[in-house]
Every structure is written in structure tokens, then in C-alpha cells.
Image (cartoon, helix red, strand yellow):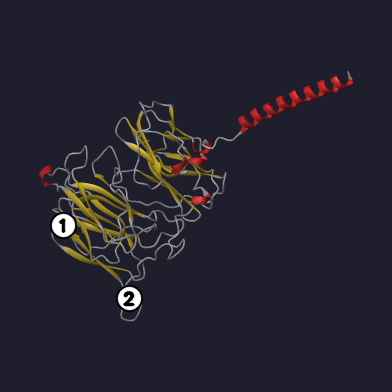
Amino acid sequence: MAHGRVSSRGGLATVAGLFLAVLFAGAARAQAPDPLAKYRLAAVNAGTEAITQIYMRAAGSTAWGPNLVSGPLGANQRVTLPPDPEMGCQRDIYARYAGGTHSDKLNLNICAFSTTNFAGPTMPAGGGSIAMTVKNVGSPDMIGFYVIPKAPGGVSLGANRLSGTLAKGQSARVTVDAGHCVFDMEAIYAGTIREYRQRVNLCAQDEQLFAGPEMAAAAPPAQPAAPSQPAPEPAPPLGAQGQPAATDIYVVNHGKDTIVRAAFRRSFTNEPLTNQLSAPLAPGQRQLVHLPPGAGCLYDIVADYRNGGNSQQLRLNICGYSDAVFASPEPGRAASGAPAGLRMRNAAKGAPIRGLFLSPSNAQTTSFGPNRLSGTLAAGQSITIPLPLAGESAHCDYDIRAIYVAGVKEDRYRVNICEIGGQVFNGPGSAPPPGARQ
């Protein structure tokens, strides 16, 4: 009997042990972290206009992949985006609205958020101001924040709206002109990593959360020749005494309207645009512009025309260029005048272009359109983009953007390609200093 009692107790203990083991194993399974959890992100329509398309890609890559919205996404509705860990945490997200406009978030760290909001554009607020909150929810310090009205013809690069740095969890209130609802914005983190948001409707979203990059991905892969260092900006030419000489460039008028003003300012500064023409520039004429010595190579140039309108070349590296060519927009020109293709050449010294974007200047559907490169465009290489673009009629006037591998971009607005055959990009020079806006 004693032996039986011991055996019974041992059997009960064994059963109890098995039961507890199964229980703990189940609990362990229930508490095991989801390896895809941090890659799960819901896109929410925070506006009133339906979202018809959402695309996502690894930040800076060329392929957008399929549309992630199966049907119109109405106000306050959401869609969960595929948790693809192979894309990493840094993503570009593009949302298109029923009315044809779109918004993008570029270099967004989705691993820091469970949701991200989009809102279609609304009419201008009509005066007063909007007080928005910008909050850093990521680990890197935010050292710069810029918000710029998305207004036709706007050229202001704006000023840093932060009085100091924003550490993780800190917020700042920023007041913006409420003559507009739709703004472009940019956050800059320690290490000069940037996140861009384009066409944000602040009338519908007055709080913006930024996270910065995953620390492991805070810098692009180092180049063997110069680890973690940007390529140096081309030095201004030296004069006879070995001092920096004035940087000279011709402003050339290839259009049919007189240029009455060619205003320059150094890129990434808040300097006013200053007219550098000594006299109006008639069609077919050119005029030499002397820029101050030692001021660097990167300039923004805005050409104003006698009969209205302007063309802009922003972040132009004039060192190595002889001409800055402009031609007045011709929105009413016959479609037969448009070329069958636009040739673009990378004249940079060692700075590959990873993105080329263009769209008709009068387009209401996109700002620059999709990336036209299937890979990178190395220094000295060219590409011809067939025209007109898919789904578009023929045009003369285009907005064009080149993005280099370091993330610096060069923009040209209202380029009359019917008068200016191809486009040459001369590279970004050095990366802008911390706190400077690209």
C-alpha cells in the first residue's frame, strides 16, 4: 500500500508537471514577440477626400510596387500596409486622392509608428495663422525643421523653425501662415539625415510626428575612399594672386519673352534673391553675371519674364557651368512643338543621380511624377525620356528634379523644353551644412 501511495503521488506529480509545462509553453507562445510587429503600419485617411491609391517602397529605391488600396479609402478609414521586413524601416509612401492630387512621405521610419495619416488638399485657410505641433518620437535629435507653403511659384526655402534641438519625446509649436493649407516640410536629424513630407494638409493635421531614421540606418553606406564624408564642393576658381576669384556664369535667354530679372541667392541660406542683370535680356541674348569670390558654387536662380511668369533653377552648381539657360514658359504652344524625348545628362564629378522626376508644369495630378530611372545615372551618362509622358498630352513646360545618391536634390521649374533641348545636371557639390534645407 505504501508503495502504491508513493506511485500514485509520483503519477500525480508527473501529470501536474506535464500540465504546467504545457501551460507555460502555451504562455510562452502567446507572449512570443511578433517578428513583423514593428513593420506593421496602417495608413489613415485624416481628410475628407477619398484616397484611391497608396504605394510604398524602400526609401530611395526606384520601384513603387503595386497599389495597396483595393477600393476608395474614405474619411477616417484605414488600410494596413504589408509588413515587408526586407524593405527595412525607412520607407517612401505615396498617397493619391480622388481629385488627382497626391501627398508623399519620404524617408519615413515606419518602425516608430503604428499609423500614419494623410489628408487631401483643401482650399486656402484665408488669413490668420495655424499653430502646428512638431514632435520627435525617435531616438536621434532633431536639429532642424522647415515648413514651406506649397504655393505655385513659391521659391522661399524658409528658415529653421526650431530654436534648439528636439530630443526624443520633445515637442515644439510652430506658427505658419494660414493663407495656405498645403505645406511641404522637412525634418533634419543629427548626422544631417532628412525626412521630407510633401503636400501636407495642415488644416486637417495640425500635429506632425517625426521619428528620424533607425540608428543602424542613420547614414548611407560609406564610400571606401572617404568613409562617411560627402564629396567636397568644387572650389571656386582662383585669381591671379591665389585668392578666390569671382564665380562667373552667363544667363542665356533661349525663349521668346524678355527676361527682366535674374535673381540669385546662395543655396541653403535665407539671403534675399538679388537681381544680377544690368539690363533686360532680350530673346537670344546672354549676359555675364559676376558672383562674389569665395561664396561657393551652389545657387538658386529665378528668372522673371516681361509678360509674366518665371522659371527657377534651385541648388544649381555653377562651378563648371558656363551658361544658365532659361526660356519663358509657353503653356499655350501647340502640341506639335514638343519634342519626342528629353535628354538628361549627369555632368557631375563622381556623384551618381539616383532619381530623375519630371511632370508638366501645369499638372494638377502630381508634383514631379514617378522616378524615370531604373537604376542610377553615373557621372557622364545620359538618358532620354520619351515624351509625352504616359497619360499626358504633349507639353512644352516641365518641372524637373534630380536626386543624387547623397540625398541632395536639384530642382528646375517651368522649363520650356520646346526651346531648351536637353538638361545637364552638374552635381550637388558638398552636402549642405547641418540645419540647412535641401
Q: Is residue 15 above or below residue 314?
A: above
Q: Residue at x 29, y 44 (%)?
A: 368
Quarter in which the N terminus is drawn:
top right
**Residue positioned most to the bottom:** 241
The residue that disc 2 covers is 238
User: Which residue shows up at 33% across the image and 69% down it?
Assistant: 292
Q: Nearer the viewer, residue 2 or 320?
A: 2
The image quarter in which residue 284 lies: bottom left
**Quarter of the rendering containing residue 99:** top left
Q: Find residue 10 and report its horizontal and vertical position in percent.
A: 80, 25
In the image, residue 245 above or below residue 313? below
Residue 56 in the image: state x and y as whole percent: 39, 39
Between 256 and 43, the residue placed more toward the observer is: 43
- Cα–Cα span, label 2 and label 1: 30 Å
Farthest residue, direction top: 1
Q: Label 1, on which residue?
A: 254
N-terminal of the pair, mark 2 or mark 1, is 2
Q: How many marks?
A: 2
Specify the amino acid type for callout 2.
Leu
The amino acid type, in three-letter code, at marker 1 is His
Viewed as shown, does residue 31 lie left or right of 287? right
Secondary structure at badge 1 equals loop
Q: Is residue 174 visible?
A: yes
- Front residue (pair 245, 82): 82
Judge left or right: residue 425 versus residue 7: left
The residue carrying pointer 2 sits among few (fewer than 14), some (14 to 19) or many (20 or more) residues within 10 Å by Cα, namely some
Mark 2 secondary-structure assignment: loop
Is residue 35 left or right of 297 when viewed as pictured? Answer: right
Q: What residue appears at the point 17 percent right and 39 percent down from the top-left corner?
A: 393
